[in-house]
Image (spheres, rainbow, N blue to C red):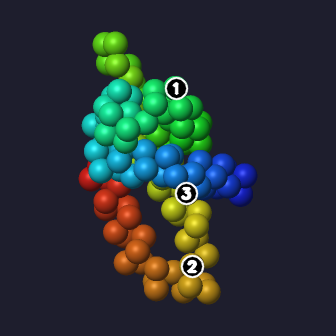
Amino acid sequence: MDISTAVTRLSALAQDSRLQIFRLLIEQGRDGLAAGKIAKQLHAPHNTLSTHLAVLTRAGLLTSTRRGRSIIYSIDPNGIQALFDYLVQDCCGGRPELCAPLTATTHKNLSQQ
């Protein structure tokens, strides 16, 4: 991952509503939620929600799938893991073993999603 992609992904999360959406979808795992259910749970207007979902999807943090008349949004574990790996790649002054518990937990949690 390059710095531009990392900044895009971090910028996508650096807004209240988008961070709430992201955290809600992290809880749901790969099953995700329909856009309407996200709007209902977060009390968000549909038009602004679609904008936020588009930003998170373009950033590589979410995926969308059409199921019938609904669009289901879910986390993109690969995009999230790539960002996390980028953030900690030079962890602990060249002593990556110090970060191993942190990175192992993240890999495990995302693979279970």
Query: Which structural element holds mark 1?
Result: helix
In front of the other: 72 or 92? 72
- Across and down, in percent, residue 5 comes to 67, 50
* Residue at x 56% of width, y 85% of height: 92
Residue 83: which disc? 3
Query: Which structural element holds mark 3?
Result: helix
Asked if labels 3 and 2 touch by Cβ distance under 8 angstroms, the answer is no
Amino acid type, label 2: Cys
Residue picked out by circle 1:
47
Residue density around tag 3, few if under 14, some if 14–19, many if 20 or more, within 10 Å: many
Q: Quadrant of the N terminus?
A: bottom right
Residue 91: which disc? 2
Asked if labels 2 and 1 touch by Cβ distance under 8 angstroms, the answer is no
Is 39 placed above or below 90 here? above
Residue density around tag 2, few if under 14, some if 14–19, many if 20 or more, within 10 Å: some
- Across and down, in percent, residue 71 comes to 39, 23
Mark 1 or 2, which is nearer the eye? 1
Alpha-carbon span between mark 2 and mark 3: 14 Å
* Residue at x 57% of width, y 51% of height: 15
In front of the other: 9 or 35? 35
Res 72 seen here: no
Alpha-carbon span between mark 1 and mark 2: 40 Å
Amino acid type, label 1: Asn
- Point out the tag, 1 or 2, that comes first from the N-terminus: 1
* Residue at x 58% of width, y 38% of height: 55
Residue 98: which disc? none
- Point out the tag, 3 or 1, that comes first from the N-terminus: 1
Q: Quadrant of residue 67?
A: top left
